[in-house]
Amino acid sequence: DAGVIQSPRHEVTEMGQEVTLRCKPISGHDYLFWYRQTMMRGLELLIYFNNNVPIDDSGMPEDRFSAKMPNASFSTLKIQPSEPRDSAVYFCASSLGPGRGVTGELFFGEGSRLTVL
Amino acid sequence: AQRVTQPEKLLSVFKGAPVELKCNYSYSGSPELFWYVQYSRQRLQLLLRHISRESIKGFTADLNKGETSFHLKKPFAQEEDSAMYYCALLSGGYNKLIFGAGTRLAVHP
């Protein structure tokens, strides 16, 4: 398995543009997480899904951010409109469900580095 | 509020020196804590869990509920230990992890 796959790896865009980040979790994993990493705040959980259903989106910073998981093998994180303060590395992670994996073990993608000018 | 605090952004040591990466947490229930590591050009990965009471790559971490701490220790640092280390707390929902801001460990020859 190639692990969690994220695209694009790097994105440079201008303020006001729409940004879409994509994630393919590990096959068979029930949970999918989106995190944002910044120097100041470290890793922040934005939202997570269980069996394609959003469970907790309390970390989504504002209405400009939205996430979907239309099926078990694909999720998107969208920012519209983007702002310079959204510049960060966005990580997707997946995990097995209760009783099927190690509790607390998330498998991370390589991240998408977003720069908003 | 549930929180994980890693007070040091950077810890710089020489090879062979002891290492202690600090982690403090705030949690009202019985905590489950983890250390994750990200080596250069590699993905963030689980290093160890407090519940396993294991030693991984020479690292250990003991949960101290009195001090609400979960410090990561290694008696003799190696250059290959240089990496970013994150402490994480299981918070509410299944596998919902809250991470600290991270500490970069630099081990010099």
Image (spheres, helix red, strand yellow):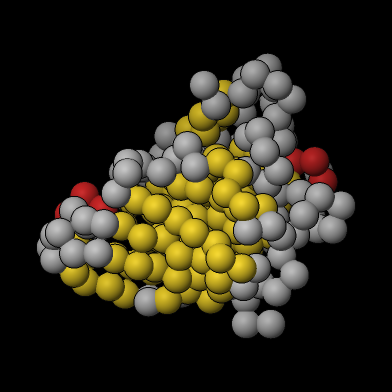
Residue situated in front as seen by the camera: B43 or B92: B92
Horizontal and vertical percent for residue B77?
57, 57
**Above or below, B7 relative to A31:** above
Horizontal and vertical percent for residue A79?
31, 57
Q: Which residue is drawn at 68% across and 46% down?
A: B95
Residue situated in front as seen by the camera: B95 or A79: A79
Callout count: 0
Q: In this view, does A16 lie to the left or right of B26?
A: left
Horizontal and vertical percent for residue B31?
70, 30
Q: Is residue A3 left or right of residue B86?
A: right
Q: Quadrant of the N terminus of chain A?
A: bottom right
Q: Which residue is drawn at 47% across and 73% down?
A: A6
- Residue A64 in view of the camera: yes
**Above or below, B21 relative to B37:** above
Residue farthest to the bottom, as pictured: A1
Asked where in the image residue B72 lies, by quadrant, the reply is: top right
Q: In which quarter of the image is the C terminus of chain A?
A: bottom left
- Residue B77 in view of the camera: no
Q: Residue at x 35, y 51 (%)?
A: A65
